[in-house]
Amino acid sequence: MASAEPDAAEPGDMTTKDGVAFASLTGDAAAGKAVFAQCRACHVLEPGVNRVGPSLAGIVGQAAGSVPNFNYSKANKNSELTWTPEQLYVYLEDPRRVMPKTRMVFPGLKDAQKRADVIAYLQNPA
C-alpha cells in the first residue's frame, strides 16, 4: 500500500532518512536535557501538564495519542504507534514522515546523536 504523503514512511518502517541506526548510538541524558530546550516551547515533563503539545512525562513506552486530557490530531490518535526508543528516534528525525497530517509543526532533529540524547533524557529526566 502506498503512503498518503510522497515522502511518508510506511507503517512499521524504522529506517531513518540519514541511515543512522538508533542501536549504533549511546544517548547521553545530560546532553539530552540541553536538546530538550527546543521542545519546551510546546512540551513539559510534568505529569498532567499539557501545553500546545502533551506532557512528555513517561512518554517512552506509551501508546501514541494516549496522554490524558490532550486533544490529539486524528493522525496521532489513530497511528497505533508505541513510543519505544527506536520509534521516537525515527519520529524525531522527521515527524511528518512518520505521522503524516500530525499537527506537530516541529521539523525534526536532523542530528542522530541529538535524537539519541533527548530520548535518553526522556527516559531518565532526573
Image (cartoon, rainbow, N blue to C red):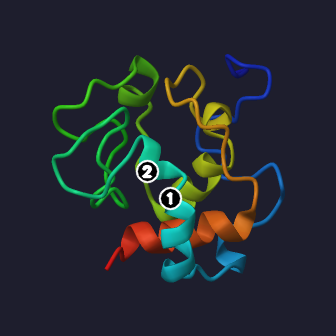
Residue at horizontal 62%, vertical 83%?
26
At label 1, the amino acid type is Ala
Instruction: Tell me if residue 20 comes above or below residue 64 in the rendering.
Output: below
Along the horizontal axis of the image, is 12 left or right of 78?
right
Counting other residues with Cα less than 10 Å from the Cα at mark 1, is it few (<14), some (14-19), or many (20 or more)?
A: few
Tell me where residue 76 sits by quadrant: top left
**Residue in the foreground of this view, choosing between 50 and 96:** 50
Q: x%, y% of residue 83?
A: 42, 53
Residue at horizontal 37%, vertical 61%?
60
**Residue in the foreground of this view, choosing between 4 and 105:** 105
Question: Mark 1 and mark 2 in contact (Cβ < 8 Å)?
Answer: yes
Residue 11: mark in rendering:
none
Mark 2 secondary-structure assignment: helix
**Residue in the foreground of this view, choosing between 121 and 33:** 33
Q: x%, y% of residue 15?
A: 73, 53
Q: How far apart are the alpha carbons under marks 2 and 1?
A: 5 Å
Along the horizontal axis of the image, is 104 left or right of 9?
left
Residue 37: mark in rendering:
1
Q: x%, y% of residue 116?
A: 60, 70
Residue at horizontal 50%, vertical 66%?
119
At label 2, the amino acid type is Arg
On-image quarter of the C terminus: bottom left
Mark 1 secondary-structure assignment: loop
Along the horizontal axis of the image, is 39 left or right of 59?
right
* Tag 2 residue: 40
On-image quarter of the N terminus: top right
Counting other residues with Cα less than 10 Å from the Cα at mark 2, is it few (<14), some (14-19), or many (20 or more)?
A: few
Q: x%, y% of residue 14?
A: 66, 52
Along the horizontal axis of the image, is 28 left or right of 121?
right
Residue at horizontal 36%, vertical 32%?
52
